[in-house]
Image (cartoon, rainbow, N blue to C red):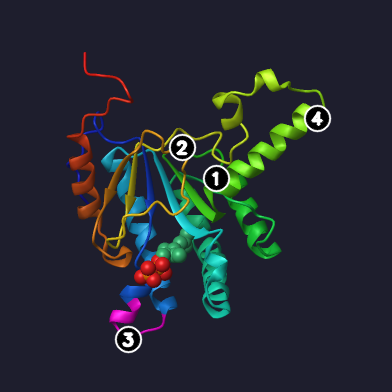
Amino acid sequence: MPKDADARTAPAHVAIIMDGNGRWAQKRGRPRLFGHHAGARKVREILKACPDLGVKYLTIFAFSTENWKRTQTEVAGLMSLFRRYLEREAQELFESGVCVRFIGDRVRLDDKLVSLMDDLELRTAGNDRVHLTVALNYGSRDEVTRAAKRLAYEIEQGRLTHEDVDAETLARFLDTHVLPDPDLVIRTSGEARISNFLLWQSAYAEYEFVDTLWPDFTAEEFARVLRDYAKRDRRFGAVRA
Ligand code: FPP
C-alpha cells in the first residue's frame, strides 16, 4: 500500500464516481454484472488505502436515481450484489474502524437491503478511523427536492419561517448533513460528467477525471491522483493573499 501521502495536503473527503464496470466486463466478453462484482472488490482496496493516504471520508456512487433505467437483470443483479456485500463485509468494516453511512432515497429499495443498511449504520456508528458513505438510489436533484419538501413542512408546522431559509439551513436537510463537503471528486473511465452526484456539496470541490475503468483503478493510482490534488491552488472564490 502506498505510504507516500502527506496528511497535511491530503483531501479529507474524496468522492468517487466508479464508472466503467460494464465496459471492463464487455472487454472480457463477460456480462456487465461480472464488472460490477470486480468493482465491488475494488471498493475494498481503495477504502483500505484511505487511512494511510490521509483520507478520512470516502463517498462512493453505487447506484443513482437514474440507474433504474437499466435492464431488470442488471438492476436485480446490482441489488443482490449490494445485499451480499453488506452481509459479507459487515464484520470486516466494523473491525477495521469504518463508520458506514448511506445517502439516497431508501423508499424504493427492498426491505431486506434497507434493514442491512440500517444495521450496518448502527453497528459502525461509533467508528472513526475512516467514514465510508455509500450513495444508493442517490441523485442530487432528488436529494435537494426531498430537503426542500421537508424544509417547507417545517415552515408549514411553524417551526421555521421563510426568513430562516439560507444555504446553511437547507444543507441541514440534505442526506449529507453530517459530512464535510468533498474536497476532491474522482470519476473513472474517461467520462467527464458529474451525473447528478453531490452537486450542492461539490460547489468548491476539485475534479479529477481518469481514463482507467473502475475495476482497474488501483491504490497506487489513487495515491497519484491525491499527489496531483496536493499541487492545486484552492481559492474558494477568493484571490491569493
Ligand atoms: C458504473 O459503471 C457503475 C455502477 C452503476 C455501479 C457501481 C457499483 C459498484 C462498483 C458495485 C460495488 C458497490 C458497492 C457498494 C458494493 P457502468 O456500469 O455504468 O459502466 P459502463 O459505463 O462501462 O457501462
Q: Which residue is mark 2?
A: 201
**Residue 169 in the image: above or below residue 58:** above
Instruction: Say whether disc 3 or disc 2 marks the residue closer to the N-terminus.
Output: 3
Q: Which residue is mark 1?
A: 124
**Is 172 contained in the magenta span?**
no
The kind of secondary structure element at disc 4 is: helix
Decide which of tag 3 and tag 1 comes sooner along the chain: 3
Residue that badge 4 annotates: 156
Discs 4, 1 touching: Cβ within 8 Å: no
Is any atom of residue 6 visible in this view? yes
Could you say where residue 142 lies in the image, as x and y percent from the top left? 60, 49
Q: Residue at 27% x, 41% y: name it.
A: 53
Crowding at mark 1 (Cα within 10 Å: few <14, some 14-19, many 20+): many
Above or below 156: residue 31: below
Q: Nearer the viewer, mark 4 or mark 1?
A: 4
Q: Please tell me whether mark 2 sits on a helix, a strand or a loop.
A: loop
The amino acid sitting under disc 1 is Thr
Q: Residue at x 18, y 42 (%)?
A: 228
What amino acid is found at the position of numbered circle 2 in the picture?
A: Gln
Residue occupying the point 81% across, 23% down: 158
Sequence-first disc among 4 and 1: 1
**Quadrant in which the C terminus appears:** top left
Q: Residue at x 32, y 45 (%)?
A: 50
- Tell which circle, 2 or 4, labels the residue nearer the N-terminal end: 4
Helix, strand or loop at disc 3? loop
Residue mark closest to the camera, 2 vs 1: 2
Classify 10 Å Cα crowding around label 4: few (below 14), some (14-19), many (20 and above). Answer: few
CA gap between label 3 and label 4 equals 55 Å
- In which quadrant of this rendering is ligand 1 seen? bottom left
